[in-house]
Image (cartoon, rainbow, N blue to C red):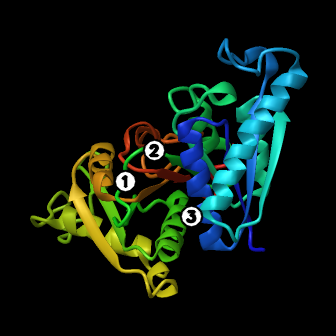
Amino acid sequence: MAGLIVVGADGSPSSLAAVEEAAQEARWRGAGLRVVYAYVWPAMHPPVDSSLLGPEGGLRAGVEELVAESVARARATAPDVEVTHAVVTGQPLTVLEKESRGADLVVVGSRGRGGFVGLLVGSTAVHLAAHGSCPVLVVREGGVESGPVLLGVDGSPAGEQAVDFAFSEAALREAPLVALHAWTTWNAPLPPPQDASEPNANPPGALAAAEQRLLSEALAGHRDRYPGVEVELRSVRGRTRETLIEASRSAQLVVAGARGRGGFTGLLLGSVSQALLHHAHCPVAVVRGVGTDD
C-alpha cells in the first residue's frame, strides 16, 4: 500500500463530497483511506428529534452510524481501496492536525456540522493548511470535471512543493496543468537594467519578460519528470488573488503554496491561499513548503 489519505467526516453533504474526493485520491494513488470523525460532547448540538440525544454512549453510537455511512460512500466510490475509520473524542482541529502527521493528504469539506461546524468560515481549514504536516485538500462546490489542474506559481522556494504536488495531481487525474503566474509592478522585482550607464532604464516589456522567465524556471525539471502532463504557462499582469479565483472557474482543482513571495516571515498561511480557501470555484489544495514550519 502506497501512502494514506485521511478525510474528516461528520455526515454532512459537504463531508460526504469530501469522502468521495478522498476515495478517488486514494484510488489514484493506490493508497489507503482513513475516515475520521472528531467530536466534543458538550459542544455537540444534534437536532431535537435525533436519537443522538442522551448519554455520551448514545451519542457515540449515533456518530458511529454517521461514520458507517461515510465508509459505505467511500467504498462505493472506490471499491478497491482499503478503508478504515476512527471516532475520536477531541477538538476536530487538533485531531486532524495530529492525523496529518502520518498522512500523505488530508481532505475536508468546505461546510460541516457537528464537530466540524464552521469548518471553512471559521479557522479550522485555515489552521490545517497552515499547520498540518501534509497537503490539505478542501472540497468546495463547483469545478469542471474535465478541466485542468490550476497551479498558482510565484517562484518562491516555499512554492516548490506546490509545483511538484500539482504535477503529480495532473498526472494522477490525466488532466492538463495550467501554471499561472500573476504579477503587478508592486509585487514583482524590477530586472537589472541592461544598460549599466542608465541604472533606471529598462526597455519596454522587460518586466513582463522577467516574470515569464520566473514562471518557466519555477517549472524547470518538473516537466521532465512528468513528460505525460500537458502544460500551459500563463504569465498575467494582474492581482494574484483575483486572477486565480477567476481562473478557478474552469479548473477541477487549484493548487497553491501556503506562503510565497512577498509573504511576511512567520506568517504560515498567505493571503492568496486564504482567499482561495474562501472564494475559489473548485476544490483547493494548499501545500506547505520546506521552511514553513512553525
User: SS for tag 2?
Assistant: loop
Query: Mark 2 and 1 residues: CB-CB less than 8 Å, in contact?
Result: yes
Is 46 placed left or right of 237 in the picture? right
Q: Amino acid at mark 2?
A: Arg
The N terminus: image quadrant: bottom right
User: SS for tag 3?
Assistant: helix
- Report the residue at 71% width, 37% height from top: 66
Residue annotated with mark 3: 161
Q: What is the CA distance from the residue labelled 1 to the residue labelled 3?
A: 23 Å
Which label lies toward us, 1 or 3? 1
Could you say which disc has been placed on residue 143 in the image?
Answer: 1
Is 175 placed left or right of 187 in the picture? right
- Report the residue at 70% width, 34% height from top: 93
Quarter assignment of residue 239: top left
Quarter assignment of residue 192: bottom left
Q: Do we see residue 132 in this rendering?
A: no
Could you say which disc has been placed on residue 12 in the image?
Answer: none
Mark with earlier residue (3, 2):
2
Front residue of 26 and 258 = 26
Residue 207: give x, y in percent of width and height.
21, 62
Q: Amino acid at mark 1?
A: Gly
Q: What is the CA distance from the residue labelled 3 to the residue labelled 2?
A: 22 Å
The C terminus: image quadrant: top right
Residue 159: give x, y in percent of width and height.
50, 59
Mark with earlier residue (1, 3):
1
Q: Amino acid at mark 3?
A: Gln
User: SS for tag 1?
Assistant: loop
- Report the residue at 46% width, 50% height from top: 283
Residue annotated with mark 2: 140
Residue 208: give x, y in percent of width and height.
20, 64
Neighbours of disc 2 within 10 Å: few (<14), some (14-19), many (20+): many
